[in-house]
Image: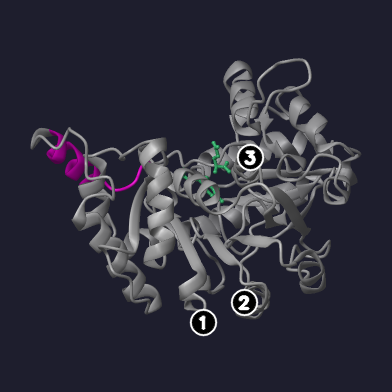
């Protein structure tokens, strides 16, 4: 995590958000909404503060939130989850992922990811001292390459990290693709760690299939999600992980020494929100329209886009506009168009063939107000002229 010259590595999100703040450009880099979640959830958090829920919550998370998570998984996916032994509340999905990887993988273990991968997955695999084995998504449409996955798996494979809907590509893995991953996990007796933070944010009828619902997979799957994306409270950092009790116990053991416990007053508020299916449904519908607006604008400006089926993000190719290096394009985009994006190479292993293949791609977020997106699209059009 230290560069050769001793400087501390900075995440691409910090770098690009810093650039947006310095230049006043529209920040379509870091994925966070510019409209908060519902007022009743905010009121619930304020009420919890006023009611004195300001000291350490139980290490596992408060019982009503663990019950709400179990209830959510049953209601949406038919999963039977025991709120007492099979759910752990975490400080965002980030902590759940970190604690799970640190708990389950170490030196000598291989951890497979799908490349491009969410940057935190790779960073924590490195912290755990495990070997990162990225499996590239296909060049056409960012789908699972089953042959590449099979070739990458071995008896050393301890964990397969899945992320669906997928950041940065917006791919929603199909049941068939997930079945192929499940078969590899079973064959090599690996655990699947699945990052499903965008579970409700799918478009055009694309169905989110949780890995844990596949036959035989509940016993070897840790499912991670977060209220940040579902309810537009990314700054509250309320996440969770669920899975078989022995795996959750391992994750809890690590969590104890990372944060011990997570923010108390936000937990009852999110427990209440989790009973609300209308808020995420409405968010997905409005996001689909905003995706269309941004995809059309990017196309009109001269980018090639792969239309995403989910998440907050679209990947666009700068090559048709003459930009071969996405990182360079992102550094210059504020001055060229007054907009900030993030390079897809940040989600790839440095120097990998995927990084090379995706060198000219950049990721834009569309989880911004429509007027902000219209402004951004108008600005980006300057690139076309
Ligand atoms: N996983 C993915 C794929 C994400 O995109 C993000 C953040 N946007 C996270 C995990 C982190 O979620 P949280 O903010 O709940 O820690
Ligand atoms: N997950 C969000 C994104 O992909 C934010 C990540 C971050 O700030 N670390 O943009």
Q: Is the residue 280 above or below the residue 57 in the image?
A: below
Name the image quarter holding the C terminus. Answer: top right
State whether residue 291 appears in this view: yes
Looking at this rendering, what residue extends furthest in the bottom direction? 215
Of 378 and 209, the residue lying toward us: 209
Instruction: Please tell me which residue is depicted at 38% across the width and 50% down the height of the picture.
Output: 252
Of 200 and 241, the residue lying toward us: 241
Looking at this rendering, what residue extends furthest in the front direction? 108
Spatial separation of the CA atoms under disc 1 and disc 3: 30 Å
Q: Which residue is mark 1?
A: 216
Q: Find residue 186 and name its label.
A: 2
> Would you say the residues marked 2 and 1 are in contact, meaning their CB atoms lie under 8 Å apart?
yes
SS of the residue at dot 3? Answer: helix
Principal secondary structure, stretch drawn in magenta: helix
Q: Quadrant of residue 264?
A: top left
Q: Is the residue 152 above or below the residue 207 in the image?
A: above
Q: Which residue is mark 3?
A: 123
SS of the residue at dot 2? Answer: helix
Decide: few, some or many residues near mark 2? Use Cα within 10 Å; few <14, some 14-19, many ≥20.
some
Instruction: Please tell me which residue is depicted at 63% across the width and 31% down the height of the picture.
Output: 11
Q: Is residue 241 left or right of residue 19?
A: left
Q: Which residues are magenta?
A: 36-49
Mark 1 or mark 3, which has the lower sequence index?
A: 3
> Would you say the residues marked 1 and 3 are in contact, meaning their CB atoms lie under 8 Å apart?
no
């Amino acid at each position: 995590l230290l560069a050769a010259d001793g400087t501390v590595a900075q995440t691409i999100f910090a770098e690009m958000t810093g650039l947006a703040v310095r230049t006043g450009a529209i920040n379509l880099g870091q994925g966070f909404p510019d409209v908060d979640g519902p007022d009743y959830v905010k009121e619930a958090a304020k009420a919890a503060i006023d009611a004195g829920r300001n000291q350490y919550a139980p290490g596992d998370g408060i019982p009503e939130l663990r019950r709400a998570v179990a209830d959510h998984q049953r209601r949406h996916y038919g999963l039977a989850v025991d709120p007492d032994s099979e759910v752990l509340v975490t400080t965002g999905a980030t902590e759940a992922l970190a604690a799970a990887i640190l708990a389950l993988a170490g030196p000598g273990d291989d951890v497979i990811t799908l490349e491009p991968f969410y940057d935190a997955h790779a960073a924590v695999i490195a912290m755990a001292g495990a070997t990162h084995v990225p499996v590239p998504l296909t060049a056409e449409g960012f789908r699972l390459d089953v042959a590449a996955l099979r070739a990458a798996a071995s008896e050393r494979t301890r964990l397969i990290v899945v992320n669906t809907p997928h950041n940065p590509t917006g791919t929603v893995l199909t049941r068939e693709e997930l079945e192929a991953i499940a078969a590899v996990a079973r064959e090599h007796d690996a655990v699947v760690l699945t990052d499903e933070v965008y579970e409700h944010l799918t478009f055009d009828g694309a169905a989110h299939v949780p890995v844990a619902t596949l036959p035989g997979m509940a016993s070897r799957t840790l499912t991670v999600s977060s209220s940040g994306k579902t309810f537009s409270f990314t700054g509250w950092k309320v996440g969770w992980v669920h899975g078989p009790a022995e795996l959750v116990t391992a994750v809890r053991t690590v969590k104890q020494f990372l944060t011990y416990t997570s923010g108390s007053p936000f937990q009852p508020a999110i427990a209440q929100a989790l009973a609300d299916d209308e808020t995420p449904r409405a968010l997905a519908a409005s996001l689909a329209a905003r995706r269309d607006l941004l995809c059309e604008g990017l196309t009109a400006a001269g980018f090639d886009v792969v239309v995403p089926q989910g998440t907050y993000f679209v990947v666009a190719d700068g090559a048709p506009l003459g930009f071969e290096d996405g990182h360079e394009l992102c550094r210059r985009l504020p001055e060229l168009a007054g907009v900030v994006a993030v390079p897809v190479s940040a989600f790839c292993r440095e120097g990998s063939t995927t990084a090379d293949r995706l060198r000219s791609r950049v990721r834009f977020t569309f989880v911004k107000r429509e007027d902000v997106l219209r402004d951004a699209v108008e600005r980006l059009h300057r690139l076309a002229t």
